[in-house]
Image (cartoon, helix red, strand yellow):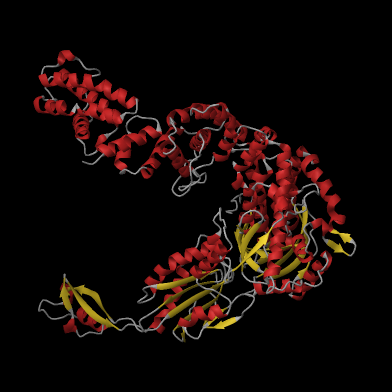
């Protein structure tokens, strides 16, 4: 069976568009191309293509079943077909006696001949082209067609047969284009020859092959780095990768290596090869000429960076700190100086010592530096460089450097204690400020990266062991914001729930245990996490079963009933089972409380479990809903006291049993 | 490149090339602009259905990019070579690469690439998609297919080609500093502009009178509104008031006189004017005062 090719020829596509197409094409082909099973997807800057083998030459014939009039209308009282039935049969090309009767209607079956591939492919392929969705699209001609960049040709072949595809005003035929500067038109005589023809014309159409070639060539050069992850983009910046190396003057090594690497990667998509050398991937040209040009460009970029760096060094970190009042952190929440003041205070509450407070005071000073203005991704790093140059203690410099960690899911936590404190303070302040100003994330909109901040905060508590008394920190931060005249419009105390929701995805326990623990009343992130973990580990234990019983039975009845007494009155107790439960509660309650307070949740659970049997006995022997209103109210109170005592371990009924 | 063209020779070759491709060769506009896009030969002419091709050198003023003539890559005034082709011809990229050949750049000897660059001009309510053109790693041209101007979807998509003349000349002449560019035999770019950079940097960063500028912004804004509110509106003079507002805003920004909040508000005011001018230009009729719908961009 024949092979099908479609190539969408474009002006240079962004890498993200290439990848979006690579993700979508298999599904679009499966949906629109008959028999379109496995497709080979080939994407690059000037073409999005796919090949499908064994496309059926014609669709299967199929039977279409159509519903006609109701039986009552189709057949007269005499059982003979009416004019309505005859008309329906005729319009479907079947004899009236072949009409079926089912479900109160008559039905006609019609055999529809499958179309040939050549007949149906033009439309099917047009649908594939117009079905592609990109993050950003544009128009370029009067047809109004939208795509990531202009589409300039379509090349569709079914084996040797050219399939015309009508999309916008784009010419369609059996011709492709080779390398932009070294080859012209390329006739594709047969679909299966597509990749070979392009390779002869200076184009490697397979992104996997291009990537492999680049990586192999870089490996051959020795140790190479890609700290900002530009490789994925570079694969789609070239059609025929030419990996070259260049060198830069040693005098630039006075700049921090990371600055040099950022200049290389952010501006030029180079790969650092260790001091003084770099690799880059060209799309062609004379290697010596291209190398010389790139070396010249990098030297210029580094000169510019060195100029900015020298200005910053001359100015010094303290002078930068001094200009923070003039730099806005948030239009409605003051300057970076205000923020630094809040961070200092929060760092203290987080148990930070002198290094933490000094680091907090200087944490944002580099926002006033020329380097961070030019390279925002170097924030924190530049501050640390300038702090070291200013002779500040290493603990302070390290904390400034680490404050933005963890930046993402896989990123490491700060290594130093002061770094963890500052990182937590910064996140708490970002969350509190946004929530207080009414800028909570909604749906996919999270411009300040608050979800990431919340996850980072959880990780600092859980993995970093930092005690983060979040509710108290938010409360204090709000006071500071208010005092600094920020335009507070909302109560930000729901930061707690927002952050703790992230814990559900972070801990390696079923979410129900996290939800149970969140209801415990604990207000420190790490404690909630440890409680959830303890509950999950103990879920099958007898202790858990006992505590669960006590909580569940007490809560189920008393939690929903009205009329509990304000306080327990022992004089109103008449049954021995009541006395037994009160005694058990008096023994267990304080132990639960102190163990939870000490974070010893295993012990607390053991104590809570002691309430299981007396609660069971209570329910066996005592009628809670007694006729005497005072006795009833007292019994409800007793159950509520039991529930609240065990409830220090969370809402155990969240956990399915 | 056996013989590198001088800076002025390079400009002359571009003029010749684009004249041969049917462009109206215009001269720089007389009012301060931040980029060739602001010149009415681009902003206004690219609105509406009429075909238009123009090319011109544009002095581009970016007050906050000044470095007192001390940094060989940053200037408060640099020179763009601007080409607009409306509607964008199908072979526009091929023609552009042809223009590089006219300058003596053989694309088969160099690594010429188009790297994604989405352009947005918030004060003009304008955006488009296109590329930075890299030659051996050097960004020397911005290429944009306009999608909106003044917040309005365009009838015809214009291709805008903006050559960074200093960078291109540095590439052609193999210079690492714009000040060393040979303008013409015996005269460098630095001879012509270094002192200019120094004095204007002092003015932009230190001397420009903030209260005066704030007042000017408001006066130009009022003047623009007045010209648009006439029975028979005058969008062309009104547009110059938009340019004045935009430049005054850039000066205030360089003086550090604008907070982040105010910044957004100033930009919105200029964009609002630009949109009203665009509507008046298209309609050739009075614009109702109540049309305060702002640009979506």
- What x and y, as percent, mark residue A276? 67, 55
Q: Is residue A524 above or below residue B237?
A: above
- What x and y, as percent, mark residue A420? 50, 35
- At 41% from the left and 35% from the top, the residue drawn is A496
- Residue A365 visible from this viewpoint: yes
Q: Is residue A562 left or right of residue B241?
A: left
Q: Is residue B30 left or right of residue B158?
A: right
The residue closer to the viewer here, B152 or A170, is A170
- What x and y, as percent, mark residue B25? 78, 68
Q: Quadrant of the C terminus of chain A?
A: top left
Q: Is residue B103 above or below residue B247?
A: below
- Residue B256 visible from this viewpoint: no
The residue closer to the viewer here, A554 or B230, is A554
Residue at the right extreme, as displayed: B186
Q: Is residue A643 left or right of residue A178?
A: left
Quarter assignment of residue A64: bottom left
Q: Quadrant of the N terminus of chain A?
A: bottom left
- At 52% from the left and 64% from the top, the residue drawn is A17
Quarter assignment of residue A287: bottom right
The residue closer to the viewer here, B274 or A158, is A158
């Amino acid at each position: 069976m024949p092979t099908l090719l479609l190539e969408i020829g474009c002006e240079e596509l962004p890498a993200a568009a290439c990848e979006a197409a690579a993700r979508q094409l298999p599904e679009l082909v499966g949906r629109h191309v008959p028999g379109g099973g496995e497709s080979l997807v080939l994407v690059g800057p000037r073409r999005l293509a796919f090949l499908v083998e064994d496309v059926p030459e014609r669709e299967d014939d199929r039977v279409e079943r159509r519903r006609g009039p109701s039986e009552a209308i189709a057949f007269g009282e005499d059982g003979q077909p009416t004019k309505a039935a005859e008309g329906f049969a005729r319009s479907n090309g079947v004899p009236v006696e072949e009409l079926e009767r089912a479900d109160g209607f008559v039905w006609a079956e019609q055999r529809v001949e499958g179309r040939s591939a050549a007949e149906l492919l033009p439309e099917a392929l047009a649908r594939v082209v117009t079905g592609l969705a990109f993050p950003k699209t544009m128009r370029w001609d009067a047809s109004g067609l939208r795509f990531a960049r202009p589409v300039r040709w379509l090349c569709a072949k079914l084996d040797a047969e050219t399939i015309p595809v009508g999309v916008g005003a784009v010419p369609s035929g059996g011709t492709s284009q080779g390398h932009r500067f070294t080859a012209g038109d390329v006739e594709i005589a047969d679909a299966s020859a597509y990749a070979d023809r392009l390779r002869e014309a200076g184009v490697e159409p397979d992104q996997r092959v291009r990537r492999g070639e680049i990586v192999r060539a870089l490996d051959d050069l020795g140790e190479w780095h890609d700290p900002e992850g530009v490789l994925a983009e570079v694969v789609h910046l070239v059609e025929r990768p030419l990996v070259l190396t260049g060198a830069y003057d040693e005098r630039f090594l006075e700049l921090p290596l990371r600055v040099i690497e950022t200049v290389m990667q952010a501006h030029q998509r180079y790969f650092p090869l260790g001091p003084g050398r770099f690799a880059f991937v060209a799309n062609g040209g004379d290697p010596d000429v291209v190398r010389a040009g790139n070396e010249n460009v990098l030297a210029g970029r580094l000169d510019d960076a060195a100029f900015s760096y020298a200005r910053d060094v001359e100015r010094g970190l303290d002078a930068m700190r001094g200009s923070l009042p003039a730099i806005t952190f948030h239009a409605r929440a003051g300057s970076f100086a205000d923020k630094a003041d809040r961070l200092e205070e929060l760092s203290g509450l987080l148990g930070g010592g002198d290094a933490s407070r000094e680091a907090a005071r200087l944490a944002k000073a580099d926002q006033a530096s020329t380097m961070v203005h030019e390279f925002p991704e170097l924030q924190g790093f530049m501050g640390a460089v300038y702090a070291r140059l200013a002779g500040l203690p290493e603990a302070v410099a390290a904390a400034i450097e680490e404050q933005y960690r963890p930046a993402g899911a896989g990123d490491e936590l700060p290594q130093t204690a002061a770094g963890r404190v500052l990182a937590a303070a910064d996140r708490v302040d970002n969350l509190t400020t946004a929530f207080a100003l009414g800028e909570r994330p909604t749906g996919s909109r999270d411009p300040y990266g608050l979800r990431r901040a919340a996850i980072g905060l959880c990780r600092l508590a859980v993995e970093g062991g930092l005690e983060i008394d979040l509710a108290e920190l938010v409360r204090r931060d709000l006071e500071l914001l208010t005092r600094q005249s920020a335009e507070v419009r909302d109560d930000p105390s729901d930061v707690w729930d927002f952050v703790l929701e992230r814990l559900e995805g972070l801990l390696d326990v079923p979410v129900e245990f996290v939800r149970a623990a969140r209801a415990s009343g604990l207000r420190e992130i790490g404690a909630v996490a440890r409680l959830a973990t303890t509950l999950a580990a103990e879920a099958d234990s007898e202790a858990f079963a006992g505590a669960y019983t006590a909580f569940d039975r007490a809560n189920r009845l008393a939690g929903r009933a009205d009329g509990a007494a304000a306080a327990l009155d022992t004089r109103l107790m008449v049954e021995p089972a009541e006395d037994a439960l009160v005694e058990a509660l008096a023994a267990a309650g304080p132990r639960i409380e102190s163990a939870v307070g000490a974070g010893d949740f295993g012990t607390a659970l053991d104590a809570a479990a002691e309430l299981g049997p007396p609660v069971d006995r209570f329910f066996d022997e005592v009628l809670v809903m007694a006729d005497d209103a005072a006795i009833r109210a007292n019994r409800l109170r007793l159950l509520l006291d039991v529930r609240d005592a065990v409830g220090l371990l969370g809402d155990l009924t969240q956990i399915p049993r | 490149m056996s013989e590198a063209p001088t800076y002025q020779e390079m400009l002359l070759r571009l003029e010749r090339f684009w004249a041969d491709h049917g462009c109206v060769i215009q001269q720089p506009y007389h009012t301060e602009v931040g980029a060739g896009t602001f010149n009415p030969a681009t902003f206004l002419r690219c609105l509406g259905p009429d075909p238009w091709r123009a090319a011109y050198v544009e002095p581009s003023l970016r007050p906050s990019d000044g470095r007192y003539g001390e940094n060989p890559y940053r200037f408060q005034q640099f020179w763009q070579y601007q080409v607009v082709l409306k509607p964008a011809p199908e072979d526009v990229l091929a023609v552009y690469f042809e223009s590089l050949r006219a300058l003596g750049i053989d694309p088969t000897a160099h690594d010429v690439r188009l790297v994604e660059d989405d352009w947005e001009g918030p004060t003009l309510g304008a955006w488009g998609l296109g590329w930075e053109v890299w030659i051996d790693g050097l960004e020397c041209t911005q290429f944009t297919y306009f999608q909106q101007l003044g917040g309005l979807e365009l009838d015809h998509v214009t291709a805008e080609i903006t050559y960074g003349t200093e960078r291109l000349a540095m590439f052609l002449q193999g210079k690492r500093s714009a000040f060393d560019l040979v303008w013409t035999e015996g005269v460098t770019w630095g001879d012509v502009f270094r002192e200019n950079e120094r004095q204007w940097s002092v003015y932009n960063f230190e001397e420009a009178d903030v209260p005066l500028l704030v007042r000017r912004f408001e006066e130009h804004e009022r003047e623009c509104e007045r010209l648009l509110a006439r029975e028979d509106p005058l969008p062309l003079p009104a547009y110059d008031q938009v340019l004045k507002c935009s430049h005054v805003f850039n000066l205030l920004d360089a003086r550090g006189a604008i907070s982040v909040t105010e910044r957004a508000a100033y930009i919105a005011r200029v964009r609002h004017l630009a949109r009203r001018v665009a509507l008046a230009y298209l309609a050739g009729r009075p614009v109702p005062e109540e049309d305060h719908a702002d640009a979506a961009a």
